[in-house]
Image (cartoon, grey):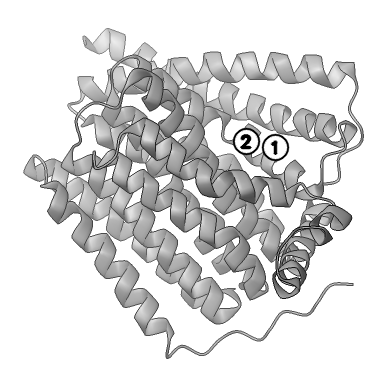
Amino acid sequence: MPEDVCVPGILLFCAGVVASLAASWLLVSRLERLGERAGFSEAWLGLVAALAADAPEITSSVVALARGQASVGAGVVIGSNVFNLAALLGLAAVVAGSIGFHRRVVVLSGVPAVWVAAVCLLTVAAVVAPVAGLALAAVVLVPYVAVLGMSRGRMEGLRLPARWVRWLLAAVHEEETELAEAIKPGPGTWRDAVAALAALIVVVGASTVMEVAATAVGRRYAVADIVTGGLVLAVVTSLPNAVSAVYLARRGRGAAVLSIALNSNAINVVGGLLIPASLAGLGPGSGQGTLVAAWYAGLTVLALALAYRGRGVGRAAGMAIITGYLAFVTALIITVEQGGVRPAAAVLPAVAVAVAGSGALILARPLPRPATRT
């Protein structure tokens, strides 16, 4: 690309970033209002908010996969998930001092999160086909979403042991209580539906421009596609979620922060990777793609181990998660400089981080148990 074409490319990228992020905020607010009108539970409203906020990442990934740029597409989604863990949990905890929540909330949101991260790794490493990965993700996510949308009476009627039902009621109630305080939309109207549609069109168009421009500029400066997707586009498209997480953490809404972070990551994988890859293919597995997916899985386990052990995430734990992200960035850049990495070797650093971090937490002093909200 000539120099005089590169400058407009950078300007187009910046314009796409601003338009996409602004439109995604409008989309979030309008979809929340429409969900309130439809009678969604607080937990489902949280899922709707996460889905709308993920629109830039998902759109950029779909566009990249449709253009045959598997490294960019997978990099945007999975790299965004790694950044989400560092920003939504790590940075939020550092800024707020600590994020406290009950262990039930960690298990309720954490089990599907770990499952989806593992499925993502197996799919990117070409161990399972995208269609099989989508089916495996649905095995856990469908019941999880169904439970979040159940009324108390319907949940009490589940044919499960009474102890399990009581546990589910408590976990969902704790999550919904904080989401109710964090998300307070009024009922939507037809104007909100029109605004949401317009915002969605802007997000799709701006994200398309952003992906095309970023890829073109990256290739002009010989930047690897995995870096363009996994670091540049991943970070930029995740900034709204990061700002929201810091805001909620400072207000003491720990369960809302954890739920939005983990649900956002699951939505990214399903909507931005598994579904489009099932339709258009993902291409051959690569060591760098496996590296990104492995770090996503490893940091997910580490973050949840910290959260479960400490009944929250304090500043030290937040710094550990951020350090893990910086280690991921370093590892990715090193593999690019070396020209690649074998898929088997790509998994080892992330596994070591997850195992060492989780083991060290056994001796860590937990944070005080958060007070129950009334």
Viewer can see residue 242: no
- Give the labeled residue for mark 1: 48
Seen at 30% across and 76% down, the residue is 356
Q: Separation of disc 2 and disc 1 at Cα?
A: 5 Å
Residue 182, given in percent of the width and then of the height, sits at: 79, 53
Label ID, residue 51: 2
Viewer can see residue 352: yes
Task: Between residue 208 and residue 149, name the one nearer to us.
Answer: 149
Residue 32, given in percent of the width and then of the height, sits at: 79, 35
Quarter of the figure with the N terminus: top left
Q: Do the residues labelled 2 and 1 touch (CB within 8 Å)?
A: yes
Secondary structure of the residue carrying tag 2 is helix
* Residue 67 left/right relative to 312: left
Secondary structure of the residue carrying tag 1 is helix
Indicate the amino acid at tag 1.
Val
Indicate the amino acid at tag 2.
Leu
Seen at 48% across and 77% down, the residue is 316
Residue at the limit of the structure toward the left, as seen here:
338
* Location of residue 255 (image quadrant): bottom right
